[in-house]
Image: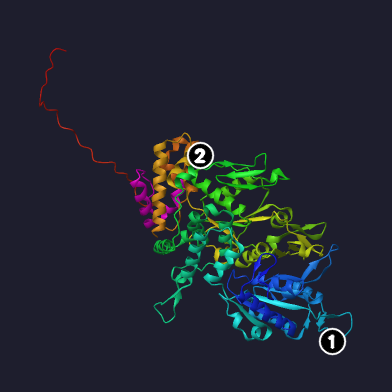
Amino acid sequence: MNDHTIESGFYATEMHRDLMTTMAQDHCYGRDILIIGGGGSGKSELSRQFCRKIGYKYQLFSLYKDMTARDLIQRRTTDSSGNTGWDHSPLISAALNGDALILDGVERLDPDSITVIERLVNDREIDLYDGRRMVPYTSKEKNEMILKVHPNFRIIALATNTSSKNLLASELLSMFSIHHLADLDAGEHFMFIKKCFPNAPSIAVDSLRRFIQVLETKKEGKGKESQTVAASLGIRPLSTRQIVRLARTMHTFPDNAAKELRQHVKNVLLTQFLPKNQQQMLEELMDECDFEYDSHTEADKSILIQGVNDENKVVIGDIQLNVEPALNPELVPAPLFYEIPSHKRVLRDMLESLASGEKHLLLIGNQGVGKNKLADYMCALLGAEREYIQLHRDSTVGSVTLSPGLRNGLVVYEDSPLVRAAINGRVLLVDEADKAPLEVVSVLKSLVEDGEMMLADGRRLVSGEYFKGQPNCLPIHPNFRMWTLANRRGFPFLGNDFFREVGDIFCPHVIDNPDKDSEIELLRMYGPNVGDDVILKLVNAFADLRVLVQDGVLTYPYSTREAVAVVKHLESFPDDGLVETLENVLGYDSFNKLLRDSINEVFQKNEIPLLSAPLDQEVRIELGTESELPLPLKTEEWKLDNI
């Protein structure tokens, strides 16, 4: 275990080598292992590399909150004749085959569920739901109802140390040999970047190293316990996974690394959704670490976008990417999209991420800012086939992976858009990811980060040559991409904290409303016959509303979608007028007096008199006081000669 750089691009520090050495000792003693570490610290990859080093095949079993004790062992199935039976879970399959089982997410399970496998862990014995029983390999019991646990069977359990009291349960302490995977410090991250990403400019890497170091610095709090600078700013420290992503981008595009580092870090930390004072403190911290400013407003106007050309390349500004022609052109979206400077910049940044090796993107922002439009247009530019799935509060792990149906009296499972995209190498667009239960979005982690996913019918999506030829395994196409769309957490969207749970496995892009000039240009394209003065008033009014949202006066972030809806209505029905059209968008807010007064004040400031008023009051608009002019008086007389 003394390799410094392990295959598959895994970089082992002294801490990793020591940890794998102690894991190897436990393996020789026949002990199962529990690795506890922070999110994105490399627990899964470390486990896979350990299995490869000792020559073990491994199976991944991703756990989620609502998983029952039965799901851990066996699950109900229906064969082609309509007969029901039991199918082994990855835990039982690994025990029979002598594989290593990577049990990911034990902190999510209820303690009563995890203790069901205590007998299997400690005694290598367990009763199955189909009536059979598993016994140790050395047992002399022999009959058709007895299954032997392979002597090479091992469990590597993984847990995140951020949120669960289950890890302190006495049952877990007795079941596993516990190992702690510490986060790398700033110096170790610096050495890692230099070793694996040599093209990253030293100036940018040094600024990033100092920034990481400052975030990890502890300072005295008001109580007895001290807290890190990151915690005082309301953010999480950069995980190893996020630092790898930043370093890879700097390595791929070294010329842009220094000037774009600030924006990349702000996207990773989602600073746009922090309170103003915390945003200011973070900006000052980046100034101290010598982060450059990238003033690209004027440059955005000159960005040229070229879709797939004769050389099968897509070019956006200074970024280009080789693509493959679509086998099913009917699956390539063709949205109505107007290229405005703000959106050109977002498209350019998305292509930069794809060109640097990222496959899975996260577009996060308020609703109505154009996330779907941008994702569809990027697919159109790439000529990429797209599958679409929309999550909601009733989504389950089964409904996301397979669609059950009844055919000829038999229950059959049809592949969901997720499965079709994975096996055919398409782009999967996951919409409203923040609305789904956390256990559903957590399962996406196994597909995106680990390259594996268990389906409801017993099949598995797997990646790489490692699983080639194994039964019930569907290979994941190397061109498979998952682009996830989510709203920011909190009111009024009332979604889950998607980014906190699994956000760092995606490359994030924060989508905001276009700037003033871009929004004016966009509205002119949607309403060419709408007057420029009307569009200017509308843009200024919505900009003022968004300022009130940032200041906490309003909660609903009025977006470009509402402004576009108003202009499209005026384009189609010009006789309705601006005031009446706005009532269609803002009418619901008229029932809240405080909210109505704030909105009315904004629109009156921009010379738009809204009609919203309480139902029991008369609508009045005071235009001014009339007064008669006095009679004209003669004051001077001028005479012009020689005309």
- State the image quarter where residue 58 is shown: bottom right
- State the image quarter where residue 90 is shown: bottom right
Mark 1, residues whose alpha carbon is within 10 Å: few (<14), some, or many (≥20)?
few
Point out the stretch of residues depicted in magenta.
584-613
How many labels sit on residues?
2
Which residue, given by chain and number where applicable, does mark 1 sit on? 139
Which residue, given by chain and number where applicable, does mark 2 sit on? 526
Please tell me the numbered disc located at residue 405: none
Instruction: Indicate left or right for 46 with 210 as reference.
Output: right
Of the pair 94 and 215, the residue shown nearer to us: 215
Q: Position of residue 103 (x, y in %)?
A: 69, 74
Q: Residue at x 47, y 66 (%)?
A: 211
Element carrying mark 1: loop
Q: Residue at x 86, y 63 (%)?
A: 81
Q: Quadrant of the N terminus?
A: bottom right
Of the pair 586 and 445, the residue shown nearer to us: 445
Q: Which amino acid type corresponds to the residue marked 2 in the rendered image?
A: Tyr
Q: Position of residue 139 (x, y in %)?
A: 84, 86
Instruction: Indicate left or right for 72 with 239 as reference.
Output: right
- State the image quarter where residue 539 is shown: top left
Q: Quadrant of the C terminus?
A: top left
Does residue 308 show up magenta in the picture? no
